[in-house]
Image (tube, grey):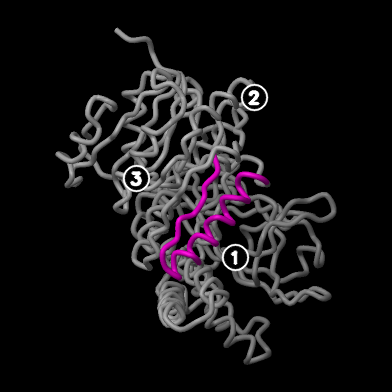
Amino acid sequence: MSPDPMFSVIIPLEYHRGQWEQSWLGWIAQTADKSLYEIILVVPPDFTAREELKALAGDEARIEYAGFGHDIGLCAFGATKARGRYLFFTESHCRPEPDVIALCLRAIDAHSDWAGFSCRSVPICHNRLSVAEAAMYQADIEFGMTQHPWRKVLDQCFVTRRDVYWECGGLREELGHFAEWVLAAAYHARGYAIGYLEEARFHHYYVGQIGELKKFTLDFVQGEIRYLSEARRDPGSELLEIPVEWSERDKLDSAIARNALSAFVRYSLAGRGWRRPDEMLRACWRWAAPALLNDFRARLAARIAVLHARAVLTVLTAVGSSAAIGRWMKRYIASLIRLQRLDCIRRICSHAGPPTRLFGDCVLAQIGFHRMESSAGHKFCWSEPQAAVRIEGACGRNIVRILSPAFRAPLDRIGVYFYLDGATVDPAAIVVGHDSFTLRVDLPPSGIATLAWVCPVLRGVGDSRRLGLSIVAIDVGRAEKE
């Protein structure tokens, strides 16, 4: 039996874009000794050129047949079959230059601190759209490789120690191309360095088709939202940026928005504080829209933005300048990603973890809050004049304590009214302290209820926001028996 090679080159034959033969010719033309690397061709079920592949590869490669089609899954499957000390992931529409293996060997000797490294991607373009596509993605690749602290896994040409790859969890098929970011974050969190071997060059074919761009971004976004929905605490998960569509998805929660709307209506009908009709109408629309339309309004606006950008990009591809095509390519992709995130969140929301818990584990969701900020030694969120939180406690009598620094005025002078599942909380059940509200409330058998509040509008100096209460934390605990 031959000794294990230094490298296992794993080539998934999905998304080959008609370039798999060129890729193969690049690998068999390597200047390094053939005993140093094995080539594993991972074949998806729909690959139509199987006989041609067998004839071309002969005994110079191992052919592995997989029962699924995604290239990330094929790479992961190929890794389970690899014998090399180093795994070399690439794509079948990428052609290596003849000295790639030799340069990788040299880099391993020179950089003992590298657990892995990515090589340089050189674009192959064949139409105007592919030129703009390459410029956009190459800029992102260059940023990741040379400036970003950890986003350095590039599946076009990524080399890694096999033991570290498995220690960090490997590539997860269900995450699509977002799996690259998850793996890179895991390496960084565990203290493993990933280098950039710029002199080792791969020629990457850009397809230059709007439909393929849409397909790729959807693949990435679906993996991103699926990963976030798992609410995992793996090393590196804290490094991944949370998109605003995910962190603010509770703002599109119609059930909790209806509670905020109900609180506003009860407050208004009682004649409390609303002296300006424009303020009243603004607040009414603020809550009526999410309460009645859920995420429809946001998704409709996102879809219109996508259709507009695609129409302009299509026209420019035929008659526009290269600069204009590049600008509208970026605009199209940005609008497409937003729409796809909103659509993916809608599809999987019933299986997702709770929205970001700003105020502790007792708060399952919240609506009507500005971003987290710091002042006077406190980290807090300003609520809007109307806001609501979905809280969780025990069935029966509970104590809800809302920690609220008195930034705007003494708490007992603000004029705050609380509502639990639409019913007014008895003022006798509320104790207002120096920096907190303490409420005695009865929760239903599920232990879950929605607490809303309404107070007069505060407008800060030089601040256009409509402010309500400053909230640091919300705690829920069973009340002692009376």
State the image quarter where residue 213 is shown: bottom left
Q: Secondary structure at mark 1?
A: strand
Picture coordinates of residue 87, whole percent (x, y): 44, 27
Tag nearer the camera, 3 or 1: 3
Mark 2 closeness class: few <14, some 14–19, many ≥20 residues within 10 Å: few
Q: Which residues are magenta?
A: 119-146
Q: Is residue 449 above or below residue 386?
A: above
Does the magenta segment cover residue 164? no
Residue at the spot of label 2: 111
The answer to whether 227 appears left or right of 153 in the picture is left
Tag nearer the camera, 3 or 2: 3
Does the magenta segment cover residue 140? yes
Residue at the spot of label 3: 22
Mark 1 closeness class: few <14, some 14–19, many ≥20 residues within 10 Å: many
Quarter the N terminus occupies: top left
Give the mark, 2 or 1, whose residue is nearer the N terminus: 2
Residue at the spot of label 1: 418
- Residue ID at (75%, 70%): 414
Picture coordinates of residue 381, whole percent (x, y): 69, 59
